[in-house]
Image (cartoon, helix red, strand yellow):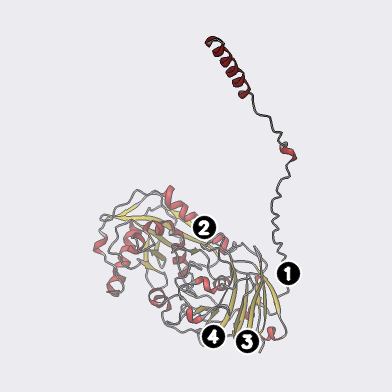
Amino acid sequence: MTRNLVSSLLLAGFVILSGCAAEPPPVVEVAAEDTITPVPEPIVVEEVRVPPDWTQAPSPSPAEVCKVPDARQGAGGNSQARQAVGFPVSKSTLPIQGEVNIIAAMVAFDDAPAPDLTADEFFEPQLEKITQWSDFWSQGKLRYEFQMVEDWVTVPVNHTDYPINSRDDYPTSRTNSARVIQEVINALPDDLDYAGADGFLVYWSPGIDEFVSDVAVRGDEGVTLQTPDGPRGMFFWSGNNWHYRDTGAITAEMKKNYTWSTWIYFMLLSQGLMLHSPGNGWATGLGTSQVPNPDFSGAITVWDAFRMGWVSDDQVHCVTPEDIEAGPLQVMVTPQEVFAGERKTIIIPVDRSSDVVVIESRRSVGYSEWRGGDSGLLVYTVNPSVGTVDLMSQESQRSCGNTDDFSKWAYYLYPDSVDMNQLDCNDFRAAFVREGDTLTHRGITISLEFSAEELDYVTIEATTP
């Protein structure tokens, strides 16, 4: 066989083999997707919470029984004690029902000029919040109204000529405060309704470094202010330099944004309330802390709201120790942060002279902003005969929360589960009575049986021996 023939045969075989190798592999049939059995998703069963089938019973005792008189009333029982914590509210400058009319102004000095802050972006919204607050917490019984001065008012003096530091020099500070107040009134517009006004609130320009203490008069100290309507004893309140500087975690910006709550605090003091208890410094109400740190509540105690007439008699479940001895009592309480409600509080005058137990329901909604979403009951005891010392200055400067380092007019009570030896006196969360908790106090057990969104179901009974 010739060499050419052999080569041709080899080439032909290579071509045939190559063609066989190029054929595609057999197709493997795969089941269609719709024939694959899906893995079932796990079934999540949500807990169905059913509240107790309770009916709101009438208050076992009339609300009048729980209007415990302040022990510092005059011998005849017809005078109002200074800084009373029982009934009635101390007589002061501003009315507690109806309308409170306030002239509100932003004020600068020659040496503390006005900042780039307008009424539209700052001042008016703060005043609106104050009015809204009064509508909510008084349940429509009181309304803060304002005559707002739209432009900055500049007093043509240097504020450094009037240093005010009551701790270092009270007589001089009192004199300087009265002078500054009069200078401010003299610089205000003449067309304001001074005759219809109950007082003044002033927002200072930053830079008032020499105002270490508040520039203020309650209006009931015998100080007469000269107004275009004539001489009058009026309320005047403003802050001091603390409100315009950073202090730790509380910044000057935060203080500016919470001008509304600070001003409400000022007005409540001149409406006869003591504030600063229970839990001074705690974020349970603006009477004890006016700026977030970082928690906050714009509430006032239900006890004070009751004293002001903002909580009506039929919203109070008044329970005496004798009522409890007759058998367990069941009450449904509406949280303070929820408007109105059939029952806003349970009050138990365990000892009318020194131990009035007040129960209020609370929620982290609306006016209360608590990081942990805390909710449940807060229970405190009020002492209507606490004494005549100046409690406000003591509690605001030197006391820790709920401790008895200094005498207070009210203290929070703690649930039975709290270890009192491990307690942080500044931790307001430890005082919450939560669902399933009990609180025992002087032969009485308070139990939170169930906590719904807008109701707490509370049992009160005599403590088992």
Which residue is tagged 4? 354
For the residue carrying disc 2, how many other residues have a C-alpha within 10 Å: few (<14), some (14-19), or many (20+)?
some
- Where does the image place residue 174, in percent across and percent down from the top left? 31, 71
- Where does the image place residue 196, in percent across and percent down from the top left? 47, 59
What amino acid type is highlighted by mark number 1? Pro
What amino acid type is highlighted by mark number 2? Thr
First of labels 4, 1 by sequence position: 1
First of labels 3, 2 by sequence position: 2
- Taking the image as shown, residue 244 lies to the left or right of residue 46, namely left
What amino acid type is highlighted by mark number 3? Gly
Residue nearest the observer in this picture, 26 or 267: 26
Vertical placement of residue 92 versus 405, above or below = above
Instruction: Tell which tag, 4 or 1, sits nearer the viewer.
Output: 1
For the residue carrying disc 4, how many other residues have a C-alpha within 10 Å: few (<14), some (14-19), or many (20+)?
some
What amino acid type is highlighted by mark number 4? Ser
Instruction: Tell which tag, 1 or 2, sits nearer the viewer.
Output: 1
Which residue is tagged 1? 52
What residue is shown at x 66% (from left), y 65% (from top)? 452
Quadrant in which the C terminus is drawn: bottom right
Which residue is tagged 3? 443
Q: Quadrant of residue 168?
A: bottom left
Which residue is tagged 2? 131
First of labels 2, 4 by sequence position: 2
- Taking the image as shown, residue 196 lies to the left or right of residue 327, namely left
Cα–Cα span, label 3 and label 2: 42 Å
Cα–Cα span, label 4 and label 1: 34 Å
- Taking the image as shown, residue 406 lies to the left or right of residue 360, namely left
